[in-house]
Amino acid sequence: SQGTMETHKLFLPSTAVRGGRAQTRRVQQQQQTPPPYRERVEGAESFPLDFTAVEGNMDNFVVQIKNLAQSLYPCSAQKLDQDMKLHFLKNVSVTCNDGSPAGYYIKESKGSKRWLLFLEGGWYCFDSQTCESRYETMRRLMSSTKWPLTRTGRGILSPQPEENPHWWNANMVFIPYCSSDVWSGATPKTDQSDYAFMGSLIIKEVVNELLTKGLENAKVLLLAGSSAGGTGVLLNVDQVAEQLETQGYTGVQVRGLADSGWFLDNKQYKFTDCLDTISCAPTEAIKRGIRYWGGLVPESCRQAHVGEEWNCFFGYKVYPTLKSPVFVAQWLFDEAQLTVDNIHLTGQPIHEGQWRYIQKLGQELRLTLRDVTAMFAPACLSHELITRADWTDIRVKGISLPRALHCWDRSLHHNLHINSSHSHVTPPVRGCLLQLIDSCPWPHCNPSCPTIRDQLTGQEMSVIQFLKHMGFDVQKMAQQQGMEPKKLLGMLNNGN
């Protein structure tokens, strides 16, 4: 009952922690003088916990919370159901590529007023030939006929506080990608066309349905996505904000989190004809795609690039035109970017030209992120970040991504109260860094990067082995940097 919930909430911080008096006292002090940024709790709105005070004894603390949560459920509920469940859209005219119904997975969190909507990634197709090939090899990305009934959330979609310290108790919604159009299309299937491209309409329709499930009372809606889903966030976040506003839900703050979707329209390492999705240059693929899908882009970006709307699929061109606050998470050496640029890191050590291209890519990406106010950009060779189970382990300047997102939330909350004139201008909150970007120049020069595996053998590699595999000449590089090879190796091992 609500009463029970409130009672437990009052006692939780001081009784749940076992870590000596100092720690208990710190938690009690924190409870007595809540920091100004914390949202006021209305009714039985989840546990307003800030885990920073108990980091030293987190495991025990989490066990206590789980025991408490379990005890609040009726005895018959032996296991809290943590999976997200599949719902097909009631509006059957909004479909996947093949005309099968689109849908979403949801795990509701009744007490919470925070909603996380996640857009799945998975490349795209841009003409009848590439779409036919995709339908043969990756049907689940074009059809809902074989979707499982439930999904388990990982990373930012996990309901476990150990894996997801800041968002674990939000309402989780996973929207599967089955439109192959970078979430931009609004074209139904007709007798003339083989496929529907309705990514943009799928998002709109999911939001409409969620408004009958509690989203209407939300405080925050975070539209997140990885890869093509990350680009989808940049293309749709303002549309979602506008949709809620025009329907009168002005109390919902809409924000974006774009993971691994900040692609560059750069020149390929080796030019190739546009025959398949993987080797087609990004600009050419999107130019063809936007026509084929009937792709929509944000109105303000469309006006900035009339006749060349394809520009709006590239983060650094669409970002300055957006009204909604957006956090960008992006590996500086993104594997998908390298793939479309025709750098393939398999088997053979790469030669110097490719190595220089990779380093230049990192520099170019850094430059395009210069005006982004909230970001997390580690110098790692990887792809997709927020749905990794180990996403809390990766750090930039000693700060993890969940921590950075927590800081960003606080700054936006603070921002609301001082009514800043422009949503991208977020005043710093004490102790919060919002522009987290590595300055070291090589892939995996950050020691917290995910483990590298040899793509052929599956064997784990150390940074030194990886650099040798990449054809990295330590002697030569040390000369260029004007230092001893030994010193350089030491730096690489330590990640400085």
Image: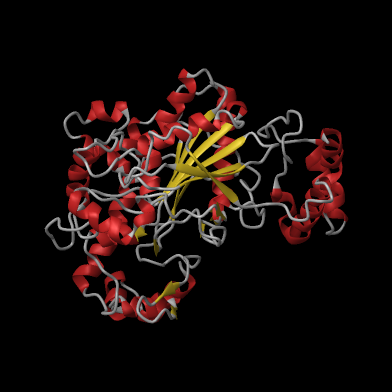
Residue 157 location, x and y as percent? 56, 50
Would you identify the image quadrant in which residue 295 lies? top left
Residue 373 location, x and y as percent? 44, 39
On screen, residue 351 above or below 15? below
On screen, residue 234 above or below 61? above
- Decide which of 268, 66 is in the foreground and name it: 66
Q: Residue at x 24, y 58 (%)?
A: 133
Residue 463 location, x and y as percent? 42, 75
Q: Is residue 247 visible?
A: yes
Q: Residue at x 34, y 60 (%)?
A: 333
Q: Quarter of the image containing the C terminus?
A: bottom left
Q: Residue at x 43, y 57 (%)?
A: 378
Q: Is residue 242 left or right of residue 61?
A: left
Q: Quarter of the image containing the N terminus?
A: top right
Q: Is residue 81 left or right of residue 64?
A: left
Question: How many numbered badges does the structure rendering display?
Answer: 0
On screen, residue 381 above or below 166? below
Q: Residue at x 40, y 52 (%)?
A: 330
- Decide which of 432, 126 is in the foreground and name it: 126
Residue 5 location, x and y as percent? 82, 38
Q: Is residue 305 left or right of residue 52?
A: left
